[in-house]
Amino acid sequence: MTASGYGIDLPSYYDYYETPVKFVPTPDGGLTAWRLDRETGGWQPANDIVDEILFAIGGDIYVRSAERFVQRTEEERARYLKGEGPIFALYETVKAIEDVAIAERRAYTPEEAALVRGIRRRTFVMFEEQLRAAGDPGADPTIAAL
């Protein structure tokens, strides 16, 4: 879907100064922007940065695929959020894999990389489903399936 007036395909995904941002279509043919809230893991309205992102007025702005957006969102959630339950247990699993690779001064093995990507896709869906159930209008667990 292309947002009228913007000439971009939606949904679209970005890193904006190291924060995941997504643009999604609105029923009237426009777009709404959502920025990850590092304090809650939910989504904050971000329409105020649309032009800056689209016209790359600022510096640290990158277009991301849906897969990379999911991975970045979960990297940020795991880094900034603390809690208990299955999502946080999976975050700890990824951290353990990261810690071993760092201690051994190496990149992930192909198996570790695949495991981390899979866990992050899973936690993304779990987190987004919880957000949606709590009424967060920016939540969309289907992104991980794109």
Image: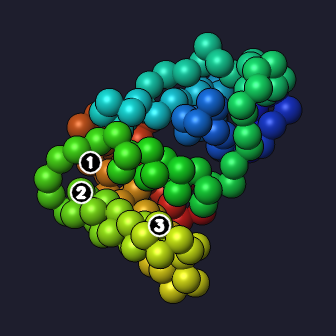
Look at mark 1 in the image and give the residue it sits on.
130
Look at mark 2 in the image and give the residue it sits on.
88
Looking at the rendered structure, the kind of residue marked 1 is Gln
Left/right placement of residue 54 relative to residue 76 reads: right
Q: Position of residue 3 (x, y in %)?
A: 75, 32
Which of the two discs, 3 and 1, labels the residue nearer the N terminus? 3
Q: Which of 22 and 106 is in front in this view?
A: 106
Callout 1 crowding tier (Cα within 10 Å): few <14, some 14–19, many ≥20: some
Looking at the rendered structure, the kind of residue marked 2 is Phe
Q: In which quarter of the image is the C terminus?
A: bottom right
Inter-mark Cα distance, 3 to 1: 31 Å
In percent of the image, x 17 and y 47: which residue is there?
83
Looking at the rendered structure, the kind of residue marked 3 is Ile
State the SS at label 3: helix
In percent of the image, x 58 and y 50: which residue is there?
69
Label at residue 102: 3
